[in-house]
Amino acid sequence: MPGAAGTKLEVDSLSFFYGKTRALKDVTFNIPERRITAIIGPSGCGKTTLLRVFNRMYDLVPGARAQGTVLMDGNDIVTTTKLLDLRQKVGMVFQRPSPFPMSIRDNVAFGPRLLGWNKTRVKELVRSSLEAAALWDEVSDRLDEPATSLSGGQQQRLVIARCLAVSPEVILMDEPCSALDPVATLKIEDLMVQLARDYTIVIVTHNMQQAARVSDFTAFMLMNPEGRHGELIEFAPTADLFNAPRDPRTEAYITGRFG
Amino acid sequence: MPGAAGTKLEVDSLSFFYGKTRALKDVTFNIPERRITAIIGPSGCGKTTLLRVFNRMYDLVPGARAQGTVLMDGNDIVTTTKLLDLRQKVGMVFQRPSPFPMSIRDNVAFGPRLLGWNKTRVKELVRSSLEAAALWDEVSDRLDEPATSLSGGQQQRLVIARCLAVSPEVILMDEPCSALDPVATLKIEDLMVQLARDYTIVIVTHNMQQAARVSDFTAFMLMNPEGRHGELIEFAPTADLFNAPRDPRTEAYITGRFG
Amino acid sequence: MPRLTFERELASLRESVVRMGTVVEAQIEASLDALRRRDGASAEKVRSQDQYLNELFKQIREQIFMVIATQQPVARDLRRLMGIQYIATELERMGDYAVRIARMTKTLVGLPDKPLRAEFGLMGDLSIGQVHDILEALIDENEAHAREVAGRDNEIDRLYHRVFDELITEMGTGKPDPDGALRAVTLLLVAHNLERIADRVTNVAEDIVFLETGQVVELG
Amino acid sequence: MPRLTFERELASLRESVVRMGTVVEAQIEASLDALRRRDGASAEKVRSQDQYLNELFKQIREQIFMVIATQQPVARDLRRLMGIQYIATELERMGDYAVRIARMTKTLVGLPDKPLRAEFGLMGDLSIGQVHDILEALIDENEAHAREVAGRDNEIDRLYHRVFDELITEMGTGKPDPDGALRAVTLLLVAHNLERIADRVTNVAEDIVFLETGQVVELG
Amino acid sequence: MAAAVDRIRRPASIPRPPDRYRSLIAVVSWAAPAALILIVGVLFQQAWPSVTRFGLGFFIGSEWNQVTDHFAALPFIFGTVVTSAIALAFALPVGIAVAVLLAEPGAQGVRGALGTGIELLAAIPSVVYGIWALYVLAPWTLLHIEIPITDHFGSIPFLGGIPRQTSLFTAALVLAVMILPTLSAVSRDVIRAVPRGLRESTFALGATWWETTWKVVLPAARAGLFGATVLALGRALAETVAVAMVIGNRPEIPSSIFSPGYTLAAVIANEFAEATGDVYQGALVELGLVLILVTLTVNVLALLLVRSASARPAV
Amino acid sequence: MRRNLWRRFGSTFAMGAVYGLTGLALVPLGLVLWFTTAKGLPSVAHMEFFTNAQRPSGIPGGGVANAIVGTAIVVSLASLAAIPIGVLSGIYLAEYGAGRWASWVRLASDVLVGAPSIALGLFAFALVVVPQHHYSAIAASVALSVLMLPVVIRTTEGAVGLIPNGLRESGLALGLPRWRVSLQLILPAAAPGVITGALLAIARAAGETAPVLFTALGNQNLVFDPTRAMSTLPLVVFRDALTPYKDLQQEAWGAALLLMVMVLVINLGSRWVLRRQIRLARQL
Ligand SMILES: Nc1ncnc2c1ncn2[C@@H]1O[C@H](COP(=O)(O)OP(=O)(O)OP(=O)(O)O)[C@@H](O)[C@H]1O
Ligand SMILES: Nc1ncnc2c1ncn2[C@@H]1O[C@H](COP(=O)(O)OP(=O)(O)OP(=O)(O)O)[C@@H](O)[C@H]1O
Ligand SMILES: [Mg+2]
Ligand SMILES: [Mg+2]
Ligand SMILES: O=P([O-])([O-])[O-]
């Protein structure tokens, strides 16, 4: 439920450029702690771009560059050079489930092991992460089977478990259900709701109704038709945004009356 | 609105096999004329397979074979050898828009030209088909540009126009909007509603709510967990199916309470 | 032309609810007319007409149910739907008052004739006027008009209290006369129901404000 | 555990509507109690308590609105939501009757004391029992029980008509006494409201049937 | 306010930690371009004596004389171009047909085996083709193709003369076989890259298999098919030993395709080991240089074509 | 309706023609396989063929042991250079392959694949043989490693590229450094494809004649010293086939059979490995 909550990420006048083209302009809002914040908007409005600023995934794109500040617990994400620490704290789940080509156990243990954690701790982590990802019951008796033998929805939960294993604080999800069928989607949504007790979750979704279903707060973004850059139109508690949005563009979008 | 309507396709005890594996078992229902019939169900339950029986598209898959009858205006589709006639009468629109690599005009004229219709008739057809597909206004001044220059939603409408140009009676659509953004999706949905005045439309969709929004009748299919083949669980007017489904499995599916 | 189906359904719902309003208005008018003319048959007709109103209400409910199930409306769209449902509920209730007035009329027809107090005419005209105007506000989606109509509540209230006091006094001072007592009580109930109609109009006004702006207000 | 959020919201809504029911029951009981004890303060308390009921009703409406907007329920889920809304509407109306009984009570307190007819106790017990039982049917999702409760309507109707006739007769034959007339009319209105409560229970029963089975029935 | 000022002062590029791994493998990846440049450079240097001596005349003259130390490349260029062109003419229709068949969806069973077979053609070392062509193909060709044609069509230019086992024609035939796998494999990939929906929607309009293939699928793959052809041409130009074994090795421009000839690659293979003297060696290296420059050009062209074909927006 | 009949007939006819042409394409394969096997078998049937070095015409008991050893040495040396460099370059292209520099690398390796192998021979000759003043296996290895390099690069790039980007990003998103993700996550996932590439490159190098003609030059004796001239199987085929002596020609057929079988086995094997890779990648 929305309500009083600390701020986890403070986005202030964030602009983003791919080379010379601007993808985001002056995005400012606060992402509350231990809540689910959804980012919605039409294709190409910069949702993914915004999300990828939060764990500096954009560093992989040559020529990409951010301007402004994004504070996490007071530290600026945009200018930090401690990328490995940042990414450990800010986990990410992608559109297509991407299990590593190894056993279920090794998938979850992969991160902790490479980070040099000791064996007993890793073993505990495998179990606790799988439990937190609501997958333990389904896989506890076949931890050594290849992860690719799982169904799509299970794979996505495995990926979430893998990400939980390195103890993140924030979990970013970029359309985590768009490759899944409705049943698996509901499971992931329920999982998100549960995880929001302990983690700050930011989810990008194409599916407005998904945002409506699971999130506590919703950010609506739109491509500015003149500047051809993405903008934040409205950020509000989800219930407010879907019942009585303040901006007519939000209303037009959520009622499907665009264009 | 559902209501009295003739039957266009009579599906009777239809089974389908891919080689030795059975994909459909004993599907029986009637698809009404000039109405939109939606086929919904979880992934892999045989929706696409069923649809592809109606224009014998499965002939392209080696080893595929259908059993039972599907009567269209009294003629059995399953056993007919007049494939070219059949496919002309039963048009099809696919998931990803697939404009031919030629101009917009040539795309629409392609079918009629193959059929050897004369030039003036083809010219008229191009216009009337594009109009019927609600695309004429957007492309009338650039008919000679390549079809690939259109946006995704426009391409999908072009494909529909192309299919209208050979005067089909039935239009099959296999997840026609799943590659489109919400705005384009709404346009296609509105188009379907308009086309249903003159054509019998059968649409396969993953998106229950789309079925709910546009269709007059809905068929719900499910994979039989023992036989591992698809079955028809319920076929009813859409409003009934979504308000008070008769089968508990339908209810479980549409309320997202599966598994 | 986005969301053809939804717009079509919404238009049909608006039409239904406006029809309901018109019928309710006619029912109230007919019941008061029957009262004035002491016409039992007309009163009976009001009662049977109510079935139609109930039917319409059920239909609207069901249609709204179906539209929600199939069109997943949000924000303004949903407000418009739910607003229509709220209004339909109020209209159905107003219809009940008309029926009760008609029932009272039938009781009165069985009693000796006596001239009706002027207040009944006034109250009737006022309440019919309110119903009529609130329907117009609904049709025009005119929030300000709705608020204005709701404000006219006081006049009817005042008239009702006057009628009530007068009738009680009349009963208390009169000679023993069972018919007179029944008549007075019955008329009192008619006034009571007219006053209730005005209350419902206020609620409809609130619903119109909600439907148009999303604000939940208290106009009572 | 599918659709956590939806189930949570639904549970909270059910809780709210049951709370509404309990409050309504308490209100009716309190108003009748005040009537019996000629306790103006208690009656006043019923009136002020009604605000709470209205609040609860508005909250339920809003929450349902939000759940529909965000959870896109269909079929059974939607029926349960809308059913709750229908029931809440009826409960709110029942609450109004309790308030009106309380208002009558205040009128009666100002009049000379006279023993209350036995029928009032009976009617009160009956209607409170109906309200109580229909709430149980709602909590247990017990459609059959709901139908049974609705069937008990007749007894109250019978009592109401008896009270009505007796009071009219009393008024018609008595000596001129304004207080007596006011008292009789007021009591008559109390009985009228109790009878109306039973009507609402029937509606709630219909709503429970709908909510559970999707059938629209007429139990009146 | 302070924040705004701060933001303006901040450098446009954001500090990023150095990526040493990237630098390391980037350096390693220089190997391929370095090799290419080195090859061209070294060959240039080796060919220098010949380049300075003969200049452009090297490409016009047709004399190849170790005794007088006079060298010119025209006969080899002629032989290379003619054998490659004929080979392409043979291979093209067959290659496209194979590609069309292999690209049919659901290429299991018989078609899968066909595909494997065609690809194995590419794996067989060219020297094996050479020995087979020399002892099996050449005698058969002489008897069953060359002699009948010269007998009946001898009056037509380039088809007359005295037919020989080792000839331009035989070399071209081997080349055709050898480039067929390249041609069909690349074409198949290009045709396969044509979206499935395109094929299916053509069928769904009521088109026949041939109409679908000819009017939609192949046109959609046009640019890529052209690229495949050019790529195959590059292979033909560069082929060495199989040609050296069957072309007859005669450094002159023949008047008939059934006469012996010589190609750039073949002459290097045959003569380089015994070549004495800077000029002779230089001339051979210059031939190599010509060969490599021509094939590089052709390859770059082909690559651009194939690449643009597969990079086209998905239709 | 008549029109449709014609259309169907035309289509069937065209389909027949396509099948016919494809059948025609397979004729040479059959012929080469058949003749090489038929003519080579008599040689291969003798054990000496594998154990003895070459002998001059007229002296019985000759074999190709020297060429087998030579092929092994030359190809091993070439692999030692080409495979590590090729794999790393391939990873570079797949992982950082967006920039301009990468596109040059890509173009260079594509062009190298098409470079005439005879030119590579000339190159190695000038680079190694000329300064050292004698032919050597090393020189041949240089030529062959240049020949193998682009094959390894492009197959590695392909195999690594098949691994969905999500895997890479997921690794990075766990807070792992880039090199770990690349070498400990992506490369193992792409291993079958990379191995295939290496095998194909080896097969190709082993079958090449032109680059070894005047680098390894050939040697009748069994030698193991890579700084000396050596023979390889293709060289044996080339040289012996063109002699007028029947016994040497027979030896050439035998060597050709050996070479062909080896190359085909590697090819079919690597296809199998590759199929697994693709299946795996598809699951990812
Ligand atoms: N690597 C890139 N280089 C250049 N421009 C890019 C790149 N990635 C995205 N863009 C552009 O930036 C804008 C925002 O893209 P982004 O992917 O963030 O949108 P999105 O809202 O996530 O869209 P979608 O819903 O389709 O995923 C788009 O206009 C896109 O074309
Ligand atoms: N070409 C094929 N060969 C063998 N089996 C197939 C083939 N195509 C589909 N199937 C199988 O038939 C069943 C039904 O497939 P179909 O594509 O009709 O399902 P669907 O309901 O359309 O699923 P989706 O929603 O994922 O499109 C599945 O189990 C599938 O694995
Ligand atoms: Mg995105
Ligand atoms: Mg499908
Ligand atoms: O492949 P070749 O050895 O003939 O160049």
Image (cartoon, coloured by chain):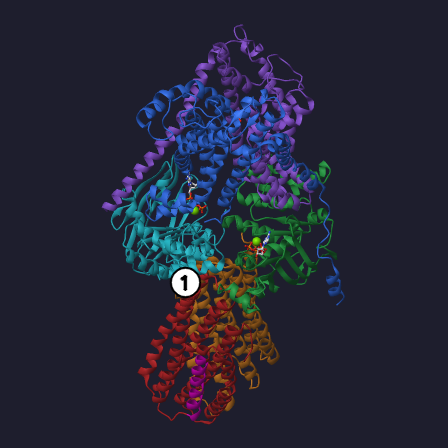
Chain colours: A green, B cyan, C red, D orange, E blue, F purple
Where does the image place residue E165, in percent across and percent down from the top left? 41, 20
In the picture of the structure, the residue carrying the numbered disc 1 is: B141
Q: Which one is in front, E256 or B66?
A: E256
Q: Is residue E281 visible?
A: yes
Give the prevailing secondary structure in the magenta stretch. helix
Q: Is mark 1 within 8 Å of ligand 1?
A: no
Within the magenta stretch, is there residue C131?
yes
State whether residue C25 is above or below residue E101: below
Where does the image place residue F140, in percent across and percent down from the top left? 62, 23
Where does the image place residue F134, in percent across and percent down from the top left? 66, 20
Q: Mark 1 packing: few (<14 Cα in 10 Å), some, or many (20+)?
A: few
Q: Which one is in front, E6 or D94?
A: E6
Q: Which of the image's four quarters has the N terminus of chain E?
A: bottom right
State whether residue C176 is above or below residue A154: below
Say which chain tag 1 marks.
B
Q: Is residue F264 visible?
A: no
Left or right? Give the position of D143 relative to B125: right
- Residue kind at label 1, given as amino acid type: Asp
Q: Which one is in front, C121 or B153?
A: B153
- Which residue in the rendered view is the most extreme toward the front? E68
- Dot 1 falls on a residue whose secondary structure is helix
Where does the image place residue D34, in percent across and percent down from the top left? 57, 77
Within the magenta stretch, is there residue D186?
no
Left or right? Give the position of E223 relative to E55: left
State whether residue C139 is above or below residue A156: below
Q: What is the magenta range?
A: C117-136
